[in-house]
Amino acid sequence: MERAAVQELRYIASELDRLGDRKGMIIVLTCWSHFLTYPVGVYIQRLHHIREAVALLLERSPETKILIKTANTGYRFDHGSDWLSLQLDTLMRAMFSKLPVTILDVWQMTICHREPENLHPPKVIIKNEILRVVVLVVLAGVVHANWTGVVWVLMVDTNKGGGSASSPCPAPPLASFLTGCQELERCEPECTDPATGNQHLRVTDPLGLSSLPGCVSCVYPRSSSSEKFIFNILWREYFTVVDNHPVALATTSTPTFPVTTPQSAEHIELMKMIEWPLAPTNVNLKLSTHPKTCEYFIINPYATYVVGESLELLIIAKDHKGQTKKYGGDFLHVKLYSSSMKAGVSGSVEDNHNGSYTARFIFQWPGETKISISLMHSSEAIAILHEKRDSRPDKVFFKGYFEKNGTHEVVECNFELPGQDVCEYYDQHNGEKWVCQRPKVLPCDSYRDHSSGGNRKILSKHEQPFFSMSLIDQEIRSSLGPLNILPQKNVTNSSHTVCFCNPSGFYYQDVWKSLICSNEPFDDHIRAANCLAGKMVYMFGDSTLRQWWEYLVDFIPALKEINLHVTHNPGPLLATDAEFNYLVQWRAHQKPLRMGPVAVHDLHYIASELDRLGNRKGMIIVLTCWSHFLTYPVGLYIRRLHYIREAVARLLERSPETKILIKSANTGYRFDHGSDWLSLQLDTLMRAMFSKLPVTILDVWQMTICHREPENIHPPKVIIKNEVDLMLSFICP
């Protein structure tokens, strides 16, 4: 074959190991021609691993059809011979004889045809070979099949046309798809489905290629325009099974924490970056910060302000009794906004470590401007969050679903389960392990599905009041009225792509105006499709990135979702646009993942996914990874990012034209054990760890913190549109 990127070459067994239990899955494989010149032991070893992978797949997905194509005759190249092919073909048939698979005997189909024998047979023979597979797939109503690492999507629009005008009935669909299909040109009268009233064609099977009777009735729905098959390769699965879990048969969970990364000096520096002034422990609730007693003032107020000028505020933190606090550590959100102009911009906060804070803003639009200062968490609550993050990684737990031979068990899983008898699954490529309680009956290798489990109550009676709804995410009142900003100065955009700029942009009329690049709104779906034309966009991350995929599919009519027969939320999800020739894929990252249930084989490490990608023109990578790590010690997150970063660096080395876009964290995390403060900590780490690579950070933190809509981990469509528009602006500057 021609020169190919080594990342694109994969073992069939590894590809099979990546497949979960999906409805309508058809596996077609062959493996022989490139092994003719080697000792047969090499071939037997390869087939052994494929056979074991097939057996495991059938165990977890018993409805899957496995079709194995035999060898062809016609091998006439140097060092080749049909005798060598026959030797390997005999071995293959014997090794798979005890598995419920179908052997497609194309050996006899190539040896006896009137055309000269050729390793790559002419179309008339290929048609008959494919017919064996197509008939099985179509008659089973399958619209999705995995062909040894390639997903083929069979799109059926069997309408009128294809037969001659004088023909008593149209040519059968298979005949119109497979040119020259003389054997199937017989047709029978139309029939009507009594259940639906839809008209169908009768298709005969005179060669007996399927396991069904010779005449198969009511196969295809009829409509009025055209009759055709579209049989396109739409995408290739790029994901290796380096993370298929080796099983330790007998082990007790050992502590994973603390984690030492491969760059320990960097680890220490990173920890310094997220240091936070923590409140004393065991503080009485009445001495903690209360939003109703806090106040703020304008520092050096002016009679008028103009666009481009700055504003400084002094925020005074006070306790429940109205006494000014003597230490900092409170977590605040600050912004300027205008409801009438649908405008908003975030500000920065400096902790003065004495109970006061300085907030700074830059005016971005003329007209009415209001100030919003919110206490998200008191410093005392932050101290509790900090302690629980490190001491109670079990606060969130997961379920592992084990299944074998009709027996089912559900157990608890997590990064670690100290002291418990566990099944341990270790991924050497990513340096991580995952453990599940050992099932009472089933073996460790029967681990099938993963899902979120629940949350544990970990706060003491003393700690719970600090997280009362009246104390968190509360706006601090002020007597200051709206400011009227004059339109005198213009703000100049820069072309830098480093998103540490504060502010990185602002909203005006619900449109994000970036201050770091010349972003443009993509209000026309044709313009968005033109931007993506010819590209492959791979999204890896969590549900906040899945919203981008969902928005694009909803926004661009020609971008059609391909049904991969998986649960929507955990995915994977794929959409293609045949008109503009591009695809957009989203895939969830590896555990921890509070979704599901999802097949463990469908969860892959981002680093492993990136390592499978070669040098391809028009490749766009969009990443995010943070929300499912909030409740764990940050060492785990640093380690995960370290491997992702190394994979990004390797990808850029072999594919320097690839664009890497990293979506920052969102604000709006309001679930149990979550907090925007925890999100900010991880977001700070992510920006620092990728600061030396030629990647683009898409700062959606500020896009979610300053909008007029209430903050939400899954923002409304108006925000998602602006986030996607920002992404498209970097893809098509």
Image (spheres, rainbow, N blue to C red):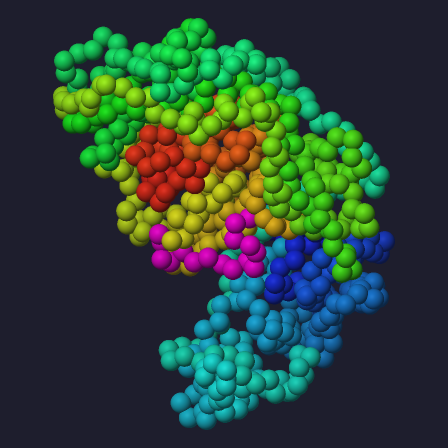
Instruction: Give the percent coordinates (x, y) of residue 500.
Output: 40, 22
* Observer able to see residue 699: no
Seen from the viewer's position, the closer of residues 262 and 352 is: 352
Instruction: Classify residue 496 by image quadrant.
Output: top left
Majority secondary structure of magenta residues: loop
Point out the stretch of residues depicted in magenta.
555-570
- 111 to 687, vertically: above or below: below
Instruction: Classify residue 547 by image quadrant.
Output: top left
What residue is drawn where x is 65% and y is 32%?
A: 394
Seen from the viewer's position, the closer of residues 1 and 135 is: 135
Instruction: Give the percent coordinates (x, y) of residue 395.
Output: 62, 32
Seen from the viewer's position, the closer of residues 142 and 691 is: 142
What residue is drawn where x is 46% and y is 52%?
A: 583
Q: How many marks?
A: 0
**The C terminus - image quarter:** top left
What residue is drawn where x is 50% and y is 47%?
A: 586
* Observer able to see residue 571: yes
Left or right side of 40 for 707: left
Q: Residue 87 lies in magenta, yes or no?
A: no
- 310 to 643, vertically: above or below: above
Instruction: Give the percent coordinates (x, y) of residue 409.
Output: 74, 51
What residue is drawn where x is 16% and y is 27%?
A: 367
Q: Residue 564 lies in magenta, yes or no?
A: yes
Instruction: Give the percent coordinates (x, y) of residue 168.
Output: 46, 93
